[in-house]
Structure formats: C-alpha cells, structure tokens
Image (cartoon, rainbow, N blue to C red):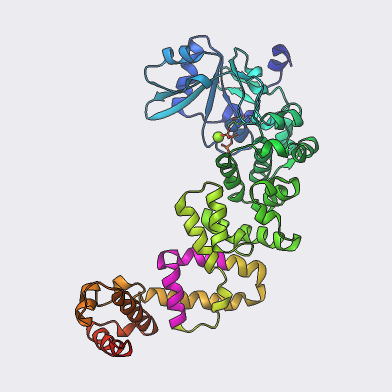
Amino acid sequence: MPASRRAMIPPPTALIEAPVPAPIREVVARLRELNHAVYLVGGCVRDILRGVPPKDFDVATSAFPEEVQKAFRKVIPTGLQHGTVTVLAGQEHVEVTTFRSEGDYHDGRRPNTVTFERDITKDLSRRDFTINAMAWDPLGLQFVDPFGGRHDLDARLIRCVGSALARFSEDGLRPLRAVRFAAVLGFTLDAETQAAIPQTLPVFRKVSLERVREEFVKLLMSPRAEMGLELLASTGLLEVFLPELAGVDAEAARLARATAAAAPAELEVRLAALLADVVDGAGAEAICVRLKFPTKVAERVRLLVSLAALEQHLESEPPALRRLLARVGPAQLEALLEVARARFEVRLASRRGDFERLQARLRDVAAGKPPLSPKELALNGGAIMAALGVGPSPLVGQATRFLMEWVLDEPSRNTAESLREALEAWKKTQGA
Ligand code: ATP
Ligand code: MG
C-alpha cells in the first residue's frame, strides 16, 4: 500500500494509548532527531493490539549499525553483522536492529546474506507471520501493516507473510513457530499455512534441536498445550523431534496430551506428565538429552516419570511410603504429586479420592522428617566402622544399607545405641 494511502488509515487507539517505557521512547526520539525512520516492530506491536502488555520492545530503524552506534553514548555491538546494536539507556538494554532483507536460504536455517534497508516494508516482508509483521512509530504515530496483520489478529489467524510454502522452505523453524503461536494465542492456522507444513517437513528436519526445543517449551507451557500438541501431531512435526509420542496409538496420544495439559505449567512437571505413560524414566531422560535440555531438567524428568505411577501406592503402609519418599527426595514430592494428580484426573478419575488420601499420607510422612538417607543415620561411617571393628571395606556399605532399611521400617530406631545393637546382631548373620 502506498505511503499516502497508509497515512489515511487512522492508527489503532490501542497503539496510540499504549504506554511505551521511557528508555524505549528516548531511543526512538534520538533516532528520529537524526532523521532516521524508527519503529517498534514484531511481538510488541502484536501484543499491544491484542491488549496484552508486551514482554519486550524491539526497535527497528533505517539507521545503519554504525549510525546507531554513533547516535548513543553507550552501546554494545550485539550482532553487528545482523544489524543489531544494544543501546544502554539508563539501566535498560534496548535492542535496535537495522531494517534488513534476507537473501536466499540454502540450508533451511539461515539466510546466505543480509542486506540493510532504508524501507520498513522491506524489513516487515522478511518476517514470519502477518501478525508479527506490523510496525508502530510511537512518536510519529505511524502504523505500518502491509500484510493485513491487524485483520488476521482480529480473525485470530496465523498466516505467513507471502507464500507459506516458500517461507517454510527458507527457514524450517517457521512451521513449528506457526503451531507455537497458534497454541500460545489460541489462534487458528490459515489453511494455506497449515497445508504447507507437511510439504516442508524435510526442511524442518534440518533445524537444530535447540531451536526446536525453545519453541516446543513455549507451546508446552501455554494454556492451550493440548491443542498445540494435537496440531504438532496432525501436521507431522511431532514425528520429527518426538517420535516416541508420535508413534503411540491415537487414544494413548490423546491421554498423554490431556495429562500434560492437566499438569501445572512447570517445565519438568509438564514434560513428565506428557511422557509418563509413553516411555520409562530412562526413555524420558533420553528424550530430554536429545532435545538439549539442561542435565538437571533431564534428571528431574527421569525421576518424576519413573515414580509417576502412584496408583501402585494407594494401599502402601508407612514403611513403603518412606521408601518412596527416600527415592523421590522430599524436595521433589510436590512435583511428583502434581504429575500423579494430572494422571489421576485424566486416566484414573474414579480413584481421585484415593489419590487425595495418598497425597495426605505422603505429606504427613514427609512432615515427620524421618531419616531417609545414610547421612541422616545416628551413626556415621566412622562410627559404623568402629562398631564393626573394620577399616574402609565393602562391609561398611552393606552395613549402612542394612541400617538404612532397618530405620526406614521404623524411624524411632534411629539412635546410636539401637543402631549399634542392630549392627551387632547383623554382624553375626554375616558370619563375621
Ligand atoms: P514472543 O512474545 O514469543 O517473544 P515474538 O513475536 O517477540 O514473540 P520472537 O521469537 O521474539 O517472537 O521474534 C521477534 C520477531 O522476529 C517476530 O515477531 C518476527 O517478526 C521475527 N521473527 C522471529 N523469528 C523469525 C523467523 N524464524 N522467521 C521470520 N521472522 C522471524
Ligand atoms: Mg520476543
């Protein structure tokens, strides 16, 4: 649309009235003062228009990176070759990126060349979806929306800028982003955009699993995770990075999605709820490692998945509950209960009352702070060796395990005196 016609459309009130943080305003004002075009772009414009406070504000400008650097006292050359300069405005870091267009993509991941541009529309045309391709100049009160982003926002549609097939063939991450935005925003995929996903799966396969994981986490943590997971499955994306889940039968997959969505939005809890009935603990850890989750996350998910089947403990006596608590660790009990609660809600609804009772009993046991690990025993390693009359040896380990089990059976036994007596008796059974 020519600039003259564009200017005739009054800018949306939401944008005019949106509070723009002072540091952002100052950066925009400074660049305008130097006669550069400057806009807020992308996610922040989208979020203001849908009435949600933006997470961050991205600034785009016609000024070239050297010009941006010269315009401010304190800058960090964050990604000069991509045109990004971080301006330090007070305590705030403001990312300022030069308008750019992208050359051909040859590997499905990155453009071969990036060209700096003086025209905002060129910059908007390289962006992924129409709702992410709007710009707003908060001082000049200019709204730029060349691809109908505002219309699609109202229609709640995720639609590619230009040909979906071409855009997904350039960058294989975009199909996953489309599904992620649909889930996070509760929008529908435009038909052409959706149809292009199965056709461009070979490009999606080339994307690094770190980038896939970042988008997948946003989808999984969204309030519409269930719908997002379903869309991942039906488009074929899931098969590429989570074949374990894509491979189960339709009913098992539906239950897994529902269980994930029933769990609170805490990363490891949702992952464990999703995977608990699909793979075992080791399998869940392997998936997390493959998707490049931090080791801590992978280990926590393994633990939660391996112990998730709390229905096995509905009839358990206190010693068994203490052993369970020793395995999960008191610090992880609430997370395990969340995973188990989601599984009961979705899969074992008729036994929810039994789960509530188990939960209360487990919490009671934990509140009593019974000794659960060898370091909590009333005899330490040295004292055990002395009582046995031996130096460091495998016997000490065996004795410690014996004492631990004996105390898990009855925590009141955890006194130095009782443990020494128990050791005496145990020694005899060992023929020592
Ligand atoms: P969020 O609120 O989730 O951060 P966002 O729109 O800010 O949403 P980002 O991933 O932070 O999303 O990207 C910022 C902007 O950069 C997007 O709005 C979009 O215009 C553009 N963009 C990001 N990734 C791509 C991509 N793979 N292809 C094209 N444009 C992209
Ligand atoms: Mg963002």
Quadrant of the image containing the N terminus: top right
Q: Residue at x 51, y 48 (%)?
A: 293
Q: Is residue 411 left or right of residue 131?
A: left
Asked if the magenta segment contains residue 304, the reply would be: no
Residue 83 showing in the rendered view: no
- Which residue sits furthest top? 35
Q: Position of residue 17 (x, y in %)?
A: 57, 29
Relative to 406, residue 84 above or below: above
Q: Which quadrant of the figure has residue 43?
A: top right
Query: Which stretch appears magenta?
Result: 319-340
Q: Residue at x 72, y 50 (%)?
A: 233
Q: Position of residue 136 (x, y in %)?
A: 60, 23
Q: Residue at x 51, y 61 (%)?
A: 302
Q: Quadrant of ligand 2?
A: top right
Q: Position of residue 273 (x, y in %)?
A: 59, 61
Q: Main secondary structure of the magenta part?
A: helix
Q: Which residue is at the front of the view, 400 or 199?
A: 400
Asked if the magenta segment contains residue 322, the reply would be: yes
Relative to 230, residue 262 above or below: below
